[in-house]
Image (cartoon, rainbow, N blue to C red):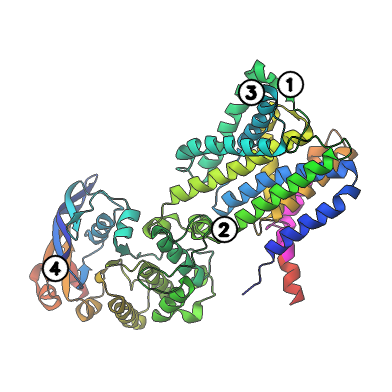
Amino acid sequence: MKRDRTVALVLGSFVLLAIAGPWLPQWAMFIMTVAFARGLVALGLLLLLRTGLVSFGQALFYCLGAYSAGALGRFFGISDIFVEMLVGGAVAAAIAFVLGFLLARYRGIFFGLLSLALSMILYGLLVKTEALGSTDGFNILPSTLFGARPGPDWVRYTVLLCAAGVASVAALLVHRYLQTPLGRLAPAIKDNEIRVEYMGASARHAVHVKYVIAAALAGIGGALAATTVGHIDPEMAYWTTSGEFIFIAILAGTGNVIAPFVGALIYGAIHTMAYDVSPNTWQMSLGAALLALIVFLPEGLWSIAGRLRAQWR
Amino acid sequence: MAIVLQARGLCKTFGAVTAAAEVSAAIEKDSVVGLIGTNGAGKTTFINMITGYLKPDRGTIAYEGRDITRLPPRAITRLGICRSFQIPQLYGSLSVFDNMMIGIGIVLRNAGLAGYFARGAAPVPGFGRAAHEVAEHLLGRFGLAEYRDRNAQVLPGGARKLLDIALTMVAKPRVLLLDEPTSGVSAEEKFGIMQMVLDAVRAEGATVLFVEHDMEVVSRFAQRVLAFYDGRIIADAAPQAALADPEVKRYVVGNRA
């Protein structure tokens, strides 16, 4: 049997980042933290993609997480990064639990478009809501950690470390979940839902559970992005944001729970460079990159790991 | 003998087509029953109604005295009525072994032995062995051990059929419905497959209903035959008697004989 190094790889990366972190430039820390936030959303998408579902609406939960974090500061004066992530994830999961009763009935394009429509409803609501800053959104209080406010030189590093920690735990939990009988149903539902039902399992229930997990991850990611960037606006629920997450998930591939974070980091790098080179046409560069990827690496970046392993043997 | 499955007055129409008209049958425990009839006679509709895929317009189905007429397929499966399919329903992107593990995982989960973080290491109910051992055991019993790591998508026809039936066995069915277990399989393979399936089923202990078009297979393996025609059961007897029935000869065996 193939040895599974995922746990070691996740823990190793975390320790390495914790040690090397303080020497990283501020901008790199920022890009990495945002990558962790986006990676969390893409991790949820991985779960859905393995089940054969493409959600064009993960921005809904990303934005819910972000606004939950923002509301904590604006209305309750809370800016603890862990509380923000916890509440962001919980709010997203609760909403997904309710929406799941509807969405778990649908597959394919219907699931995709329905999820997109729901995220656009949130966008529409936020744009019209003056109390939440309407189209401008509002600023988020600087992050604190267990009541302490890290010094200005250490804020970025602290947030990065928290992000890496949460991302590692999330990746390991999803990794574990994928090995359980319920988690392993994902490819079975993708392949043959009728058979799943005739073997005594409810495909709808399994999809519902996965949808809620994916939403919770997106909510945590949204809260993290909010506290990192320091500002939130309705754009976070816009369909192009969902598109970015799908881009990352496809770029990464669904082979391993680490892939979404690698994908998000590379996406962030491409995005930053494309914007640097051509501020007006960066979407075109990004599109070209995706096109090249689909042609040359249809199974995502993670398939490179598989090829390398095959060569070493 | 004890009655395990009882259908009473089942009716089902699809528009102008009558798929079941007052179908009644009582199936004895541990018997092997062959369902025969031309295409469209109502055999698969009968199976689909028992397994909950179709709800009858009228009539009831009782399993061990319990009314199961309105239950969804997964609830019926959990009670111990499992089915295979005319066209094998497999998890095409997974290996043969993983196909079995999916099924065993569902059994573990339904027994409350696997949750969100438990990998399902507990012994499988009904087998008293670990999941991977049960998978190997059943693959061996159905002669699929050599295909263990092959993708289910690329199996030869006979092996696909056998895997489809092996998948039903993980739940320790007490009633097994086989929809044309030998269709799409070469003539030489037919008897071997039926023999293997029935040996395996007997070893695990289950009542079997199978749909079959080959009368030689029916007379060799069935203890009792239900002959369908136009949504009705026109004969219900031991194979020799049923196949000799004039109506069966005319409508079912027909010009094949």
- Image quadrant in which you'd find residue B241: bottom left
In the rendered structure, which amino acid carries the disc numbered 4?
Ala
- Residue B2 tag number: 4
Discs 1 and 3 lie in a common subunit: yes
Estimate how packed mark 3 is, as few (under 14), some (14 to 19) or many (20 or more) residues with alpha carbons within 10 Å: many
Estimate how packed mark 2 is, as few (under 14), some (14 to 19) or many (20 or more) residues with alpha carbons within 10 Å: many
**From the viewer's perspective, is residue B200 above or below residue B12?**
below
> Does dot 1 land on a helix, a strand or a loop?
helix
Residue placed most toward the observer, B251 or B171 = B171
- Residue A12 tag number: none
Is tag 3's residue or tag 2's residue first in the polypeptide sequence? 3
User: What residue would you read off at disc 3?
Assistant: A126
Q: Residue furthest front?
A: A147
Determine contact: label 3, label 4, CB under 8 Å: no
Q: Which chain does the residue under circle 1 lie in?
A: A
Q: Which chain does the residue under circle 2 lie in?
A: A
**From the viewer's perspective, is residue B174 above or below residue A60?**
below
Reply yes or no: does residue A299 show up in magenta.
Answer: yes
Estimate how packed mark 1 is, as few (under 14), some (14 to 19) or many (20 or more) residues with alpha carbons within 10 Å: some
Discs 3 and 4 lie in a common subunit: no
Discs 1 and 4 lie in a common subunit: no
In the rendered structure, which amino acid carries the disc numbered 1?
Asp
Mark 2–mark 1 distance (CA, rounded to whole Å): 40 Å
User: What residue would you read off at disc 2?
Assistant: A178
Q: Tell me if I can see residue A248 in this picture.
A: no
